[in-house]
Image (cartoon, rainbow, N blue to C red):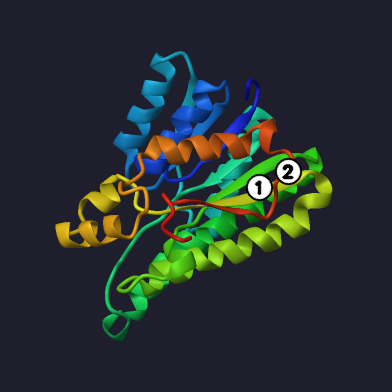
Amino acid sequence: MLTGKIALVTGAGRGIGRAAAVRLAQQGAYVYLNYNGSKEAAEAAAAEIIQNGGRAEAVQCNVADFKACGDMIEMIIKKSGRLDILVNNAGITKDGLLMKMSEEDYDSVLDVNLKGTFHTIRHASRYLLKQRSGRIINITSVSGILGNAGQANYSASKAGIIGLTKSAARELASRGILVNAIAPGYVQTEMTEHLPDKVKEQMLAQIPLGRAAKPEEIADVVLFLSSDQSSYLTGQVISADGGMAM
């Protein structure tokens, strides 16, 4: 399905990012697994892909760093000659009530989640425009649609990604570049595993399907948006949340 395609997945060491990288590689893409601090996890994911017959490599970059993102994209282009699929998954949380949230905690979450997404799109788009093709898939969140108490910074960053997705889709559509977003709900990842049991129970109670998603289920949506089966979709936000945001 994706044979010959070159993909970059940010925050690919664990969770949704890792699952997406594995799924894209299974379908024939050469996958660059971006990480910032989780070197061992990203390299282990890349090794797993290679052991199963895929092609992948881990690449370090803090997506909050504009120049570093440019260097990473340039390296991929020089090495592989092109970039076909960009999955912006890297994200952090620093939860707290709005009235007690520090400026530093607010800024750091937006720097990684929202500006990091802008950085990669900004640098990748110059090459995608020359190719006149490409897929950009941004991972937002149900929190960016509904908001979430105690996550003003995270919800703001994810809501911003939705606006960024739609603007980029309008700007890039004429050159055959499709830009879409996925808004997961409660997903079983290391990030959500640390939530208090009471919070998990409250989240499950809001999900009509009555369960959390597996990272692989979100990865399947990434694969769909990377494939020719989604050739007429752009500027869309797919809520993969078990009905949470209905």
Q: Badge 2, how many Cα within 10 Å: few under 14, some, many 20+?
A: many
**Which of the two residues, 150 or 44, is positioned nearer the viewer here?**
150
Residue 244 falls in which quadrant of the image? bottom left
Does residue 209 sit above or below 26 in this rendering?
below
Is disc 2 placed on a helix, strand or loop?
A: helix
Provide residue 190's location: percent of width, then percent of height: 26, 46
- Under mark 1, the amino acid is Ala
Does residue 81 sit above or below 55 in this rendering?
below
Provide residue 187's location: percent of width, then percent of height: 34, 47
**Which of the two residues, 211 or 27, is positioned nearer the viewer here?**
211
**Which of the two residues, 213 or 189, is positioned nearer the viewer here?**
213
Provide residue 133's location: percent of width, then percent of height: 76, 39
Question: In this rendering, would 197 be left or right of 5?
Answer: left
- Residue at 79% across / 43% down in the picture? 176
Question: In this rendering, would 116 be left or right of 207?
Answer: right
- Residue at 26% across / 83% down in the picture? 100
| Residue 179 appears anywhere in the view | yes
- Residue at 50% across / 35% down in the picture? 220
- Res 124 label: 1
Residue at the left extreme of this rendering: 197
| Residue 59 appears anywhere in the view | no
Location of the N terminus by quadrant is top right
Q: Name the residue under label 2.
A: 128
- Under mark 2, the amino acid is Leu
